[in-house]
Amino acid sequence: QVQLEESGGGLVQTGGSLRLSCAASGRTFSSYVMGWFRQAPGKEREFVAAIFWSGGIRYYTDSVKGRFTVSRDNAKNTVYLQMNSLKPEDTAVYYCAADTTAQAMGVMSLPSGYEYWGQGTQVTVSS
């Protein structure tokens, strides 16, 4: 069983920055594929970023490329999402997800590709 806990959300103005953290339980964190998703009111949960194993492989959805950076510290069992140049359309509840099985990115970019989820943290970007 893997438990995930996000932190770092909040209210920020357009153009500002936030760093989300996700602390994970488990002794084999380095083997987990970690993902970040977000869900705005009335919309489906959407993929934001994913990072594999040691962090050498990372993927982003097009709308956040160049603004968001996903990273992980396997010694601390933590994954991060650095969000810069935030826009009002980034407003959503952000979720951390984990899975112990790495599959093709077409699978890992879907919520169904992850078995474990955090409770989410709210990010609000004011215009």
Image (cartoon, helix red, strand yellow):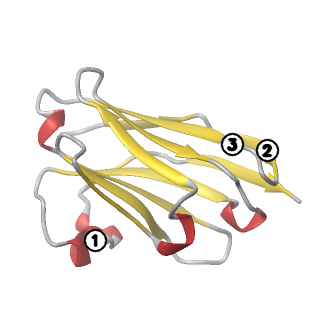
Q: Where 25 sits versus 66, above or below?
A: above
Q: Give the amino acid at mark 2.
A: Val
Q: Residue at x 11, y 42 (%)?
A: 31
Q: Mark 3, mark 2: which one is toward the viewer? A: 3
Cα–Cα gap, marks 3 and 1: 29 Å
Q: Which mark is residue 112?
A: 1
> Relative to the observer, which residue lies in front, 102 or 58?
58
Q: Mark 2, mark 1: which one is toward the viewer? A: 2
Q: Where on the picture, by quarter, is residue 7?
A: top right
Residue 4: x percent and y percent? 36, 38
Q: Residue at x 53, y 77 (%)?
A: 44
Q: Which residue is mark 2?
A: 12
Cα–Cα gap, marks 3 and 2: 7 Å
Q: Which of the image's four quarters has the C terminus?
A: bottom right
**Drawn side of residue 120 relative to residue 49, left or right:** right
> Which comes before the other along the chain, label 3 or label 2?
2
Q: Kindly state the secondary structure of the residue where label 1 is placed.
A: helix
Q: Give the amino acid at mark 1.
A: Ser
Circles 3 and 2 in contact, beta carbons < 8 Å: yes
Mark 3 crowd level (few <14, some 14–19, many ≥20, 10 Å Cα): some
Q: Give the amino acid at mark 3.
A: Ser
Q: Kindly state the secondary structure of the residue where label 2 is placed.
A: strand
Residue 76: x percent and y percent? 30, 21
Q: Which residue is mark 3?
A: 17
Q: Residue at x 49, y 74 (%)?
A: 62
Cα–Cα gap, marks 2 and 1: 30 Å
